[in-house]
Image (spheres, rainbow, N blue to C red):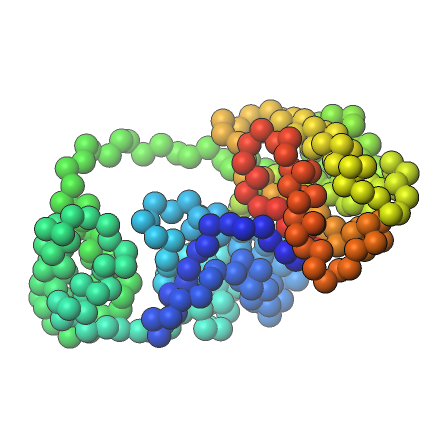
Amino acid sequence: MVKLAEKLIQIQEFDGSRVPFDAVELQTRLIHCFLAAGLRDSSYMAEDIALAVEYTLLNSNRPEPVFGRGELGSAVVRMLEETGFPEVAALFRRNGSERLVTISTRPESVSGLLAKFLACPPERFDRIVRQVCDAARLLHFDAASPHLLLELARHYEQLAEEEPPPPEPVEPPPAPAAPQSELYRILPEEAQKLIDDGILRVNGITPIFSRISFFFMMKPFAEKFHLAPPVTELEVEPLLYRMTEILEAAREAIEQHLAVTEPLPLYLAVPDMLDFIVDYERGERLGSEKLGRELAETLAAGFRCEVNRISIS
């Protein structure tokens, strides 16, 4: 699977190095945990959990999208426990998602850690470092986990800001959800016809990570419009623009049916894009990603909202 350029989330390993966050790798680990827990029928939830974690990290208000490995593991474990999979959470934790790492509570060590996560004026930053060190000293800690020190710092950072009293807690509305069969019934007729022809698949929406997922198949699309190889972009692109108008109408119908107040995250996948280029444009699979991305972007051009991810393979 090839992904278009996205905001790069960095995961800070326990040894201090950084690696890009990989939602596919997280999904694979979760699937193994579901299978090991004997929950094969629920393993499809791994994709929703991995994408929900990715979406949360992408929309964090941190100045830099850098998150600790232990912090990531704790978030996944908490999500698994809250969604009713404590046995999967236990396996995920046991399989190395978390590790006890400590750093010195001396001011220079604490300052080096917090500089990666806090964005505040120097005077306030120095005060927060002192407060964290004083708290560690009162607790008789010569060393502590980075997560504990960071939480202490965020606590003192919040105290330093004058904020209005929090509003009364309001029960959040239930997350939008709908099975695939329900979505099919409310789609415009043109979108239903694409599904019947094997060109389009619209995944059901689960409450774990409510998103609209379209899967568009290029080879059945080419057969429907009687394209004969070798085809050119001039032949394909106008047809793709027609398709994207249908997809946008389908997206609007889904959101209207679910009565959402804000656009849902939108995911578009073209699983056979490279096969289409090889078979219909006489291209080589190796080196076809650029053309494939351009065609996928053409297919996405008619959406009136942001496409959170486009993938081709």
Q: Which quadrant, please, contains the N terminus?
A: bottom right
x and y percentages locating residue 278 in the rendered image: 81, 55
Residue shown at the point (60%, 53%) measured from the top left: 3
Q: In the figure, 35 relative to 195: above or below?
A: below
Q: In the figure, 75 relative to 160: above or below?
A: below
Horizontal side, residue 275 vs residue 250: left or right: right
x and y percentages locating residue 308 in the rendered image: 54, 43
Residue shown at the point (49%, 26%) measured from the top left: 261
x and y percentages locating residue 240 in the rendered image: 74, 35
Closest to the observer: 13 or 223? 223
Residue 69 appears in the picture as rendered: no
Residue shown at the point (54%, 36%) measured from the top left: 306
Horizontal side, residue 106 vs residue 306: left or right: left
Closest to the observer: 143 or 208? 143
Count of picture labels: 0
Residue shown at the point (42%, 34%) measured from the top left: 172
Closest to the observer: 236 or 76? 236
Q: Quadrant of residue 284?
A: bottom right
Q: Which quadrant, please, contains the C terminus?
A: bottom right
Q: In the figure, 19 relative to 193: above or below?
A: below
x and y percentages locating residue 187 in the rendered image: 72, 28
